[in-house]
Amino acid sequence: MEVSTRAAASTSVGEVATRTHQQGESEDQYESSSRTFSNPNHCHAVTFLFYRINKCQTVKFELVSIDRRVNDPLAPTGVSLNPPKPLTGVGVLSSRVLATSSSRLDVATRALQSVAVEQGSTTRTTGALLDRTLTGFNQQGPIPVNIRQAALQLVDQDLVKEGLLDKVGGQVAKGAQDAAGWEKTMSLPTPGVLVKGCLDDCDICEPELKRLMDLEATRKDLENQLLQKKITLLEKSQEYRCCAGGTDATSTGT
């Protein structure tokens, strides 16, 4: 018996998403400032002291007042946050559903409908629990005003016994403020730097060099005195005056 085998072939067709990545260059510029410290003296050393400038900040805590209120579930006075949106876990991936796909609108519609259904069920559940809670409290009614005032008065009496209030319906006691309050001063470093230079008393010059420096200073002093005398003589000279006889042009009328 002969068995013939025929070749079978299969073709797989898939979608390929093409993504383009672009590369760029960025340059960072850094600016810095520098200072050069030098010693202009010949024989004395200089010590530079660097001080970092700190900022002093004072933090003060003080017990100002104690608020008393009655927590009535039927007449709430507090503030509650809005409930967060429920997590649906529904998302559309661009690599799974292409913009040119014919099923894109159908997928988006089903996703929106599922979100609306989940939000509606959560809202209905929350509303039902709230209705049942209010129904149970409506059987007793809100707390009357006289009971509120009596409860607040009892609380004030306990606070007065503990030394927190000065009297019933009063303010915070002085002793409670001193016990609960505190003040602290902190030093925070800043980028500022203060530099001070101090001249050292130690002299490293030889006696001959010291004498030479003194003679140089004396010579410059004599040169300045000579220059001052020359200026005085030039002012008295007739050649540098405006008119002969020591009179100027304005006095003679010319």
Image (cartoon, rainbow, N blue to C red):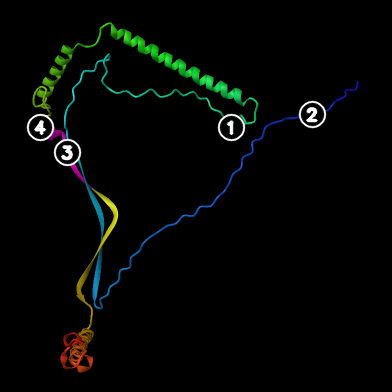
First-in-chain label (4 vs 1): 1
Q: Is residue 241 left or right of residue 100?
A: left
Residue that label 2 marks:
9
The image shows residue 163 at horizontal and vertical percentages of 10, 27
**Amino acid marked by disc 3:** Trp
**Amino acid marked by disc 2:** Ala
**Amino acid marked by disc 4:** Gly
**Amino acid marked by disc 1:** Ser
First-in-chain label (3 vs 1): 1
Q: Is residue 75 left or right of residue 8?
A: left
Give the magenta part as a residue range: 174-186
Spatial CA span between label 2 and label 3: 86 Å
Residue that label 1 marks:
94
Which residue is found at the position 45% from the left and 56% from the top? 29
Which residue is found at the position 40% from the left and 59% from the top? 31
Badge number at residue 246: none
| Callout in the foreground (4, 1) | 1
